[in-house]
Amino acid sequence: MVTFELHDTEMTTQGRSQNLVLSLVSAALFMELLDGTIIATALPQMAKTFNAGVVSLNIGITAYMLTLAVFIPVSGWMADRAGEQTVFASAIGIFTVASVLCGVSRGMWGFTAARVLQGIGGAMMVPVGRLIVLRSTPKSRLTGALARMTWPALVAPVIGPPLGGLITAYASWRWIFFLNVPLGMVALLLTYWLVANEKPAERQKFDWQTFLLAGSASTCLVIAFEEIAQGRGSTGGICIRLVLGLLLGAGAVLGARSFENSLIDFHSLRLPTFAQAVFGGSLFRAGVSVLPFLLPLLFQIEFGYNAFDSGLFLLALFAGDLLMKAAVVPILMRWGFRQVMIVNGILTSISIVMLAGITPRTPQYIVVGLLAVHGALRSLQFTAIGTLAYLDVPRERMSRANAFLSGVAQLSSGMGVALGAVLLRAPAIVRGSSQNIPALQDFRFAFLVVSVFTLVSMIEAFRLPRVHKSFHFRESTI
């Protein structure tokens, strides 16, 4: 029977330099996470600019998030080779230049290419920034430092949709990306001033075989999903890409077993708690990440709201996320991980079904309330999954487990957006319609399928041990 010890810690700093380093990394994390959510409310306006279907533009979100997932494992290896300062500064530079390219894009494919470049910068920027904090912070202050770094992950999704809507409605969607330029320049100067170019004495070989196979598999699958979502490409070609993606993925898994430092942490996957975070957590993450993509489209296309107003509705969703944080610890202490994750998974699925039933005539306070409740439920599930992930992982394997889980989490989020586009397009394909603008019943179908995903995701939770409800954390991840 496993017990933990939980107590709150506040970060104390030994000087201005350490505090500034932490602020710098937190700002970089905020900038990267903001870009993952801020364009959701701008998609309809961007579709008009590019003369493309609004669903087709989900590739801009998908390409960014999948590039993050593919290149995150490379970041730590590159930092060991070239040094933390070099890689972190390069990442900020790439991210900033790519933001400019996104802002000046004239077509959908040019924009997608710029998003891929931006994803490469983000993939190096955030993990290496976290590595800088881990290596520069004494263990006695590590809990407070990591807790402070979680706030950008909470705040960015909250302000991203309404900020993107405000910029789109009263200026231009292009300024969403141009705003990164001054932030990036300041961050670049602070990096050269504050961050040392440290390299570990021992260098490990990188698992290029798994990286290339897994990256190719992800690319094939995403292209196939995008072709389905956009209603283009032959049936034979789509099937070939789907099969090829699955075969490459299987090859990556089988080949990784023979590599000592494989990107796939098979050892940790034998642990039920870590397996739940990888398998069940991925399904849950893929499901709920569809909603921030679908909801702005629903509010603008079917409800007639502008980009800013639809962003304000999403503010209720992410505000529910934020407000739940204070209640997570008491809830888990009272009922324990296993029971909370099973019951909360069912409630989350029910909340999505209820969202599928809203119409333009539904009172706004009901819509806001449903969004806030769903946000709170998914926040509780995410926190439980994230806390449980490293429960049984030995300290010596923590780094590899973290890198593997970070890549899987990013990949599942990216695939979730692609899934949303496919689900939105599928009913039109069945009807034989070539219409690019989805109908209200198409949104309902997508929401109902997503609710099934959340139910399936909790099956893995039944394998969890019945952890005693009075648990404690020495180093809280909540």
Image (tube, grey):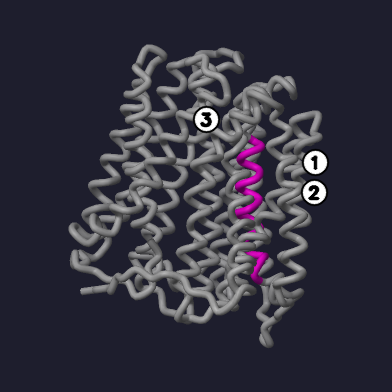
> In which quarter of the view is residue 364 placed?
top left
Q: Which mark is residue 101?
A: 1
Residue 376 appears in the rendering: yes
Q: How many marks?
A: 3
Q: Which residue is mark 3?
A: 311
Give me the C-alpha separation between circle 1 and circle 2: 6 Å
Crowding around mark 1 (Cα neighbors within 10 Å: few <14, some 14 to 19, many 20+) is many
Q: Mark 3: which secondary structure?
A: helix
* Relative image position of residue 104 (x, y in whole percent): 81, 35
Residue 73 in magenta? Answer: yes
Give me the C-alpha separation between circle 1 and circle 3: 24 Å
| Quarter placement of the N terminus | bottom left
Q: Nearer the viewer, residue 172 or 434?
A: 172
Please name the residue shown 61% across and 33% down the image.
164
Q: Earlier in the sequence, mark 1 or mark 3?
A: 1
Disc 1 + disc 2, Cβ < 8 Å: yes
Query: What residue type is disc 1 on?
Result: Leu
Disc 1 + disc 3, Cβ < 8 Å: no
Task: Specify start and end residues of the magenta stretch as a single range.
Answer: 59-76
Q: Which mark is residue 97?
A: 2
